[in-house]
Amino acid sequence: MANSNFLETEEEKELILSKVHEDVYKKMHKELDHDNDYQRLQKILHCIEKFEYSHEELKSLSNEIRELLSTDGYHDEVEDEVFMYLKKFLR
């Protein structure tokens, strides 16, 4: 989500690293950097199913994504559209 508009600000990166170890951050970038939106979405949906996230966990994830998008103090249309689309799958 942080780079849904093809930009990842330093503020967004810092927030992510406050929640996950740097090795995980790098591994996720390596996994997702070359994927298109459809491939990324399929991976997200696969993980939701595989790990059987509860409604509350998905709601919490949605709130964390919203926080991430607000971190740099700027929302653009691409981020808003991607978030709205993703939010539909996190219900």
Image (spheres, helix red, strand yellow):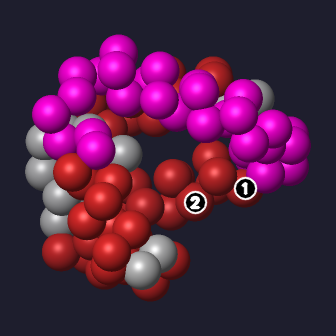
Q: Which residue is mark 1?
A: 60
- Residue at the image position 47 percent from the left and 29 percent from the top: 43
> Where is residue 46, by image quadrant?
top right
Q: Residue 48, how many percent across, how many down?
A: 68, 35
Q: Residue at x 43, y 61 (%)?
A: 68
Q: In which quadrant will I find the N terminus?
A: top left
Image disc number at residue 64? 2
Q: Residue at x 32, y 79 (%)?
A: 22
> Eyeballing the image, is 68 above or below 82?
below
The quadrant in which the C terminus is found is: top right
In the rendered view, does 88 fall on the left or right side of 56? left
Using the image as rendered, state which of residue 45 and residue 31 is in the foreground: 31
Q: Are marks 2 and 1 in contact (CB under 8 Å)?
A: yes
The reply to whether residue 73 is visible in this rendering is no
Residue 74 x, y percent position in the rendering: 26, 57
Q: CA distance from mark 2 to mark 1?
A: 6 Å
**Number of marks:** 2
Magenta highlight range: 31-59
Query: What secondary structure do most residues of the magenta stretch adopt?
Result: helix
Q: Amino acid at mark 1?
A: Ser
Q: Nearer the viewer, residue 69 or 61?
A: 61
